[in-house]
Amino acid sequence: MEPKRELSSIDLRALVTELGRYTGAKVDKAYLYPESLLRLKLRDFDHGRVELLIEVDECKRAHVADAEHVPDAPGRPPNFAKMLRNRLSGADFVGVEQYEFDRILTFDFERGDEDTRIVAELFGQGNVAVLDETGEVVQALSTVRLKSRTVAPGAQYEYPSSRLNPLDVSLDAFSRRMDESDTDVVRTLATQLNLGGLYAEEVCSRAGVEKTLAIADADESVYRDLHNAIARIDERLRSGEFDPRVYEEDGRVVDVTPFPLAEREDLPSEGFDSFNAALDEYFYRFDRDGGGGGEDGGTGATEPEKPDFEAEIAKQKRIIEQQESAIEDFEAEAERERERAELLYANYDLVDEVLSTVQSAREDGLGWDAIAETLAEGAERDIPAAEAVEDVDGSEGTVTVRIDDTTIELDATAGVEVNADRLYQEAKRIEEKKAGAREAIESTREDLAAVRERKAEWEAADGAPGAAEEEGKGGDEDADEADREIDWLSRSSIPIRTTDDWYERFRWFRTSDDFLVIGGRNADQNEELVKKYMDKHDRFFHTQAHGGPVTLLKASGPSEPSEPVDFPETSLEEAAQFAVSYSSDWKDGRGAGDAYMVEPDQVSKTPESGEFLEKGGFAIRGDRTYFEDVPCRVAVGVQCEPVTQVIGGPPSAIRDRVATSVELEPGMYAQNDAAMMVYREFKQRFADQSFVRKVASADLIQEFLPPGGSEIIG
């Protein structure tokens, strides 16, 4: 049988009873290992040194471990461990709970300056979230963004939807839930009653009920026997009177339970004084024997397996993507708070009238309900200040107004300036979180570099698989080919290496000098680029003609420190050509156009007096640097290293990055027809036809073609 890798809900119920013995222990230090293993080192008056392990990777477990079973401390602590040390050093462990009947444990810690909760999600992909005293996520090993719940820094932690708890369900409710099933008893207990396969079978055995009995053939006496069997398990869990067992099969550990199971009576087992001790022994042997042992019985006689560097590299990349996403969220949230503050000042008289009206009414002794009624009556008489009020909350002393489709909650006892300053301070607080996230991403990048270095060292010590001796053997051929130019077009098989960078939903390319250029595909993206992604050291490009994309020549990425950059002339010229080529100049069939460049602080959303700015439009103030008669030209090519993808942009920036490219100018063929023509051209050039279909389809090519007609010129 397959060895146990995850604790069940019943296991966690038993575990919580025992972990409560360590209440009052003080935290010394926190460690995080690459396998998503969290270790908290504590000191307890009665028990001495306490090592709490929480793992949420392939194995999902939590228990106190013997000091001899604890892995050596890792090297430089990652940012997550540093954060935990800052929050938990000297804190008291005040308790642990299981969230309802789910595989979630919450560990609570108190310290004079702040309280901390650690939520260990021991299901699915696994996760550990650290919360402050308000329930806001400080940091999490993995960011979760689902329709049903969000676990992300700065957001309130959301638990999964509640599940039925079979341990406290009444007999009537139990019977109704069983009757809703159309399968047999054991499957219904496992799924509808959330007992899982093993304990569903155990309940049937203890109740003397045939597992395969169809629900249609079960009567009230059957349900009563099953319900009583569950109640006896619940009673044992509540009492803490366990008889823990570690089960073996063929010399390897395969299961661990808080009490003996009838379903495991045919397996040899070892008893332990506590469930914690049993869990510690089980997972120690499981890890030592390489996942429960093998044919060699875990003696270590076989050659050590190569670590899965690619999986670890992919994991670090996923963490970086999640951290970048968190930074983007912080930026958007901070921008929203600043916009609210600016709206208050832009509508100062209206907001001041609302606040003054409420404050005067309160001074006159008017109740909050009466104030709300007065404002509602004013709205019916079309009084602008009253119409702006959406809600009055006397319990909080707040008034909510709506200005330009934006809702703003105001402190009714304060003035406009104080309310605006509160919003600015909130934006500043969020910006500080963003700074912390940037530090975290740098730490993760260092971890990624360390993994890549270990991979290189392993391969060098192992004879460098894939190096020169592997040439011609059907391997990757990468090591030998790195020193010579590869003829990608004639290769019969091209490995696909994909990426998913944050900027790929925009128009983009990298200049000949390797600077990133991004442009908007529509008015919404134009707005987003300026508000969210334009940094003070970037350069803003636009065409003289109306109807062009906002184009940014980036000095740094959104998660990187911003420094002044002296952009080379080639990059400036390529950014200008990009702006012209994807503008109305191309769509109108013009062979060239003019563009200009300004500093970010010259770009404003505030129009001149008497003017109006449409969505995606901006006012430019001050001197401009012009680029005249810039040719409308783009190249689309297929990149084969370091990643495989279609890229497009100014020809001078694309040619040297790709295995082959096609150059286009404004012409007679519609965008989708031109994309198909380019696709067919690539199919003729590459020997690996399947590679072209996967990497350079007509749809992917079309994303890099300007709007309007095009024609291939080379």
Image (cartoon, helix red, strand yellow):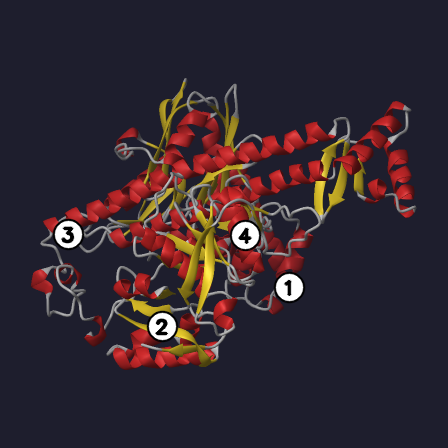
Please report whichever mark, 2 or 3, sits nearer to the chain's N-terminal start.
3
Secondary element type, mark 2? loop
Residue type indicated by callout 4? Glu
At label 2, which amino acid type do we have?
Answer: Ala
Name the mark nearer the viewer: 4 or 1.
Answer: 4
Q: Quadrant of the C terminus?
A: bottom left
Residue closest to the eye, 347 or 18: 347
Mark 2 burial class by Cα count in 10 Å: few <14, some 14-19, many 20+:
many
Q: Residue at x 30, y 74 (%)?
A: 691
Q: Give residue 615's position: percent from left, percent from top.
A: 62, 56
- Mark 1 lies on residue: 180
- Identify the residue position indicated by label 2 in the image: 696
Rounded to the nearest whole Å, what is the CA distance between mark 4 and mark 2? 28 Å
CB under 8 Å between callouts 4 and 2? no
Q: CA distance from mark 3 to mark 4?
A: 44 Å
Considering only order in the chain, which callout, 4 or 3, is on the residue closer to the N terminus? 3
**Which numbered disc flags the more N-terminal residue, 4 or 2?**
4
Q: Secondary structure at mark 4?
A: helix
**Distance from Cα at disc 3 to Cα at disc 1:** 57 Å
Left or right for 219, reference 43: right
Q: Tell me the number on the disc at residue 459.
A: 3
Q: Nearer the viewer, residue 253 or 582?
A: 582
Looking at the rendered structure, the secondary structure element under dot 1 is loop
Alpha-carbon neighbours of circle 4 within 10 Å: few (<14), some, or many (≥20)? some
For residue 570, say whether it is visible.
yes
Q: Is residue 552 above or below residue 425?
A: below
Res 205 visible = no
